[in-house]
Image (cartoon, rainbow, N blue to C red):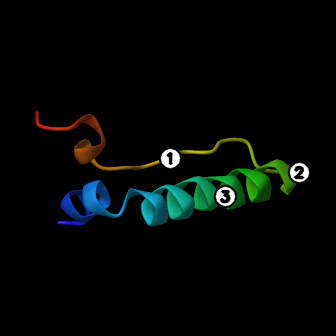
Amino acid sequence: THVDRSLHEAGAFITTDVYGSFVLLDAARQAPRLRRFVQISTDEVYGSV
């Protein structure tokens, strides 16, 4: 899975995730009529559940 790969290639995943989040939040900040921002992720961010 991507989660398994992210443990071995953390730098690339951190760059993608952090920069991707920044781009989305910056676009939301610049959208004057935006009322709500919903971030949808995966349960994998919590580890084994």
Q: Percent from the top left, x then y, of residue 11? A: 47, 59
Alpha-carbon distance for marks 2 and 3? 14 Å
Marks 3 and 1: in contact by CB < 8 Å? yes
SS at circle 3: helix
Residue in the foreground of this view, choosing between 1 and 6 = 6
Image quarter (top left, top right, bottom left or bottom right) of the N terminus? bottom left
Label 3 Cα neighbours within 10 Å, binned few <14 / some 14-19 / many ≥20: few
- Mark 2 vs mark 1, foreground winner is 1
Q: Amino acid at mark 2?
A: Pro
Residue at x 26% of width, y 35% of height: 46
Q: What residue is pinned by disc 1?
A: 39
Report the Cα–Cα distance between label 2 and label 1.
18 Å
The residue at which mark 2 appears reads as 32
Q: CA distance from mark 1 to mark 3?
A: 9 Å
Where disc 2 sits, the SS reads loop
- On residue 30, the disc is none
Residue at 19% across / 59% down in the picture? 4
Question: Label 1 neighbourhood size at 10 Å, few (<14), some (14-19), many (20+)?
Answer: few
Q: Position of residue 2 (x, y in %)?
A: 25, 65
Q: Quickly name the residue at label 3.
A: 24
How many numbered discs, if any?
3
Q: Residue at left 88%, top 51%? A: 32
